[in-house]
Image (cartoon, rainbow, N blue to C red):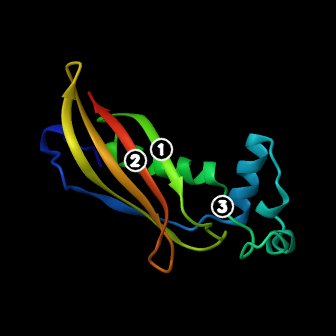
């Protein structure tokens, strides 16, 4: 799907992205980052730290927000910025939905841009991450 920037309006919803981050995905992410906090891959260590079990790393969740925005753009522009505020942990192997909406459409420096409000919603329907993105259209 490619977005037509002329048809983007404030309040437009981005399509939901359904993902179930697996323990394998988390381990591969940790390996790519060359960081191995034990609570990301060892359920007993995670529970000892007060977590519900192994969790999805925050930077990986930011990457998933970026993926959702990039898929929505479909080549019609690029992601200029993604920010996130983490509210609660997401256990591995639990489904999450990435939702978003267009908060503002504007011109800046001769370029058409949009601000997006984003959220990662856990299986209980609560936001685990609140995010924000800026996109610029071709």
Q: Is residue 119 left or right of residue 61?
A: left
Verify CB contact (< 8 Å) between mark 1 and mark 2.
yes
**What quarter of the picture does the C terminus occupy?**
top left
Q: Which residue is mark 1?
A: 83
Q: Which residue is mark 3?
A: 56
Q: Is residue 57 left or right of residue 41?
A: left
Graded by Cα atoms within 10 Å as few (under 14), some (14 to 19) or many (20 or more), the crowding at tag 1 reads some
Q: CA distance from mark 1 to mark 2?
A: 5 Å
Q: Quadrant of residue 74?
A: top left
Mark 1 or mark 2: name the one nearer the start of the chain: 1
Residue at x 51% of width, y 53% of height: 85
Q: Position of residue 105 (x, y in %)?
A: 19, 40
Graded by Cα atoms within 10 Å as few (under 14), some (14 to 19) or many (20 or more), the crowding at tag 2 reads many
Mark 3 or mark 1: name the one nearer the start of the chain: 3
Residue at x 27% of width, y 44% of height: 2
In the image, farthest residue toward the top:
109
Label count reads 3
In the image, farthest residue toward the bottom:
124
Q: Is residue 21 above or below residue 113?
A: below
Q: Is residue 74 above or below residue 18?
A: above
Q: Is residue 90 left or right of residue 36?
A: left
Q: Which residue is mark 2?
A: 132
Residue 117 shows which numbered tag?
none
Graded by Cα atoms within 10 Å as few (under 14), some (14 to 19) or many (20 or more), the crowding at tag 3 reads many
Residue at x 86% of width, y 69% of height: 45
* Disc 1 element: strand
Mark 3 or mark 2: name the one nearer the start of the chain: 3
Q: CA distance from mark 3 to mark 1?
A: 17 Å
Q: Is residue 3 left or right of residue 131?
A: left
């Amino acid at each position: 799907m490619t977005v037509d920037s002329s048809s983007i309006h404030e309040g437009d919803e981005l399509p939901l992205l359904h993902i179930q981050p697996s323990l394998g995905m988390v381990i591969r992410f940790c390996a790519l980052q060359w960081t191995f906090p034990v609570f990301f891959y060892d359920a007993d260590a995670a529970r000892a730290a007060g977590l519900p079990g192994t969790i999805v790393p925050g930077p990986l969740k930011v990457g998933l927000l970026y993926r959702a925005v990039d898929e929505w753009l479909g080549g019609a522009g690029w992601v200029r910025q993604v920010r996130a505020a983490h509210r609660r942990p997401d256990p591995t192997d639990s489904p999450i939905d990435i939702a978003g909406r267009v908060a503002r459409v504007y011109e800046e420096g001769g370029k058409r841009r949009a601000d997006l409000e984003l959220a990662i919603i856990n299986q209980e329907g609560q936001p685990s991450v609140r995010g924000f993105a800026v996109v610029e259209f071709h």
